[in-house]
Image (cartoon, rainbow, N blue to C red):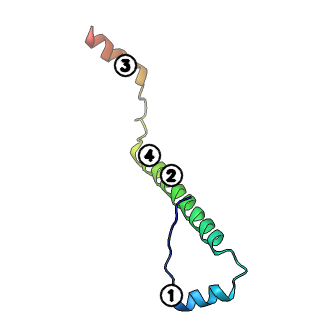
Amino acid sequence: MPLVTVRVDERLKREMERLSHINWSEVVRKALERKVKEESGRNLAEAVLLNEKLRKKAPEGWDSAEVIRAWRRRKS
């Protein structure tokens, strides 16, 4: 498993040592997992919003099948 190093200030390190019964590696691992999932979800939400902005409603009365037929007739 890869190793990740985290720097904390002296005060926080003393508090962590005082609470030595806590598995700090597990706490950090879970916090990182949560953040990664949160950011992944945010990126997905941003992609959905962008997609909605880019998609345009067809004008009233628009018939895509008719447009395709017209293109095909011009091509022949």
Q: Nearer the viewer, mark 2 or mark 3?
A: 2
Estimate how packed mark 1 is, as few (under 14), some (14 to 19) or many (20 or more) residues with alpha carbons within 10 Å: few
Front-most of residues 75 and 33: 33
Front-most of residues 53 and 43: 43
- Mark 2 and mark 3 lie on one chain; the one further toward the N terminus is 2
- Mark 2 and mark 4 lie on one chain; the one further toward the N terminus is 2
User: Disc 3 marks which residue?
Assistant: 68
User: Disc 1 marks which residue?
Assistant: 9
Q: Three-letter amino acid code at disc 4?
A: Asn
Q: Nearer the viewer, mark 4 or mark 3?
A: 4
Q: Are marks 2 and 1 in contact (CB under 8 Å)?
A: no
* Residue sitting at the far right: 21
Q: Are marks 2 and 3 in contact (CB under 8 Å)?
A: no
* Quadrant assignment for the C terminus: top left
Question: In the drawing, what numbered circle is on residue 51?
Answer: 4
- The residue positioned 40% from the left and 41% from the top of the image is 56
